[in-house]
Amino acid sequence: MEEKKQSLKENKKESKNKETKKRSRSRSRSNSKVRSRSRSRSRSNSKEKNKTELKISPKNKNNTNFPKDKEIKIIHWNINGLRPLLKTDELDKLINEENPDFICFNETKIDNDFIKSMNLHKLFEEKYKYKSYWYCPTEKKGYSGTAILTKYEPISVTYGMNIKKHDNEGRIINLEYDKFYLVNCYTPNAGEGLKRVDYRVKEWDKDFFEYINNLKNKKDVIFTGDLNVSRENIDIFDPKGREKLAGFSKMEKESFNDFLKQGYVDTFRDLHPKEQKFTFFSKRTKGKESNKGWRLDYFIINKEAKNIIMKKSDMLDKDKYNSSDHIPITFSFDLKI
């Protein structure tokens, strides 16, 4: 009898030890999973240090209804400040005379407080019948900035490249439509004495061109903006001795031209191979009066575009628009529907 009792005690003890070990292993596995998730979050946070939140508007589920048999017109203009532009009649003149479907601004030089105080979304929709999208710098007020005005609501809107070091100056807006992307870009200047040329070419160009290539793999791309480079000798009033100036350095020209060779068309030069026209005129040197200018502003499309049929690409009259040191450029195309 005593032996039986002793046996039962030992069995209970052994069972208890087994249960204790089991709970210990379970806690160990659970702790391991927690540590693993913690390490995973840590790695994820580390990866995101150099990224910024990609700002994307909600998707518009309805396909945009572009009118059939209508030539679509886009105007790009580096306005060198929205505030002074709104004090003139030049925007009214541009819209009334050209009636563009899209207007892309560079260098708006405003912030979100100004957009709210002026109620710009309402202003442009009620007065000019355009929906407007604005991207302002987050660190430096009164600097850079882009906007797109459109008659057609996009499927989605993306701001920036999702790379923090590039996205704090409000330089890129991308409107997505059923058949194409429209990208408005204000490229960083290489700076006086080319002090920023390494960033411009080795970092910005590299990442931006990759960004455009990724879009091109999905659908046609039209991108426009002050790209801050005169890519050929014909694109500057006098190339001699200017190779060390921002916008005409060997590094900048090679970077841009190498990108175009990957399958893109400089629309103005394609339609006007020998014509010398400029988009930027220095006010300091009275460049307009002597026609001493630079071609810095472009419309670029992918070479094998499936839905974009290029029609026109040109500059507007340089003497009509004087509020900025740049003049508006225009691009028209037919859209296969």
Image (cartoon, rainbow, N blue to C red):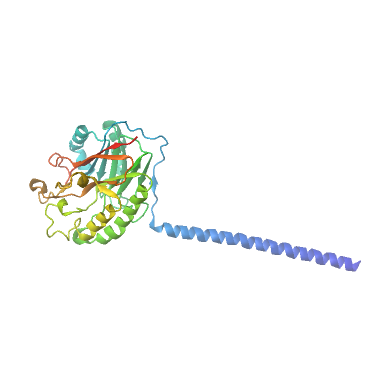
Quarter assignment of residue 150: top left
Q: Please identify the residue farthest to the right as the structure is shown.
A: 1
Q: Please identify the residue farthest to the left as the structure is shown.
A: 290
Q: Nearer the viewer, residue 30 or 225?
A: 225
Q: Nearer the viewer, residue 50 or 244?
A: 244
Left of 182 or right of it: where is 2? right
Residue at x 10%, y 51% (from the top left corner): 285
In which quadrant will I find the C terminus? top left
Residue at x 51%, y 61% (from the top left corner): 39
Left of 243 or right of it: where is 122? right
Total labels drawn: 0
Residue 138 image point, x, y percent = 32, 50
Quarter assignment of residue 77: top left
In the rendered image of this protein, does residue 270 appear above or below residue 8? above
Left of 289 or right of it: where is 69? right
Residue 30 image point, x, y percent = 61, 59
Visible residue check, residue 196:
no
Residue at x 29%, y 60% (from the top left corner): 202
Visible residue check, residue 158:
yes
Quarter assignment of residue 305: top left
Residue 147 image point, x, y percent = 29, 43
In the rendered image of this protein, does residue 67 appear above or below residue 325? above
In which quadrant will I find the N terminus? bottom right
Residue 152 image point, x, y percent = 33, 35
Left of 20 or right of it: where is 193? left
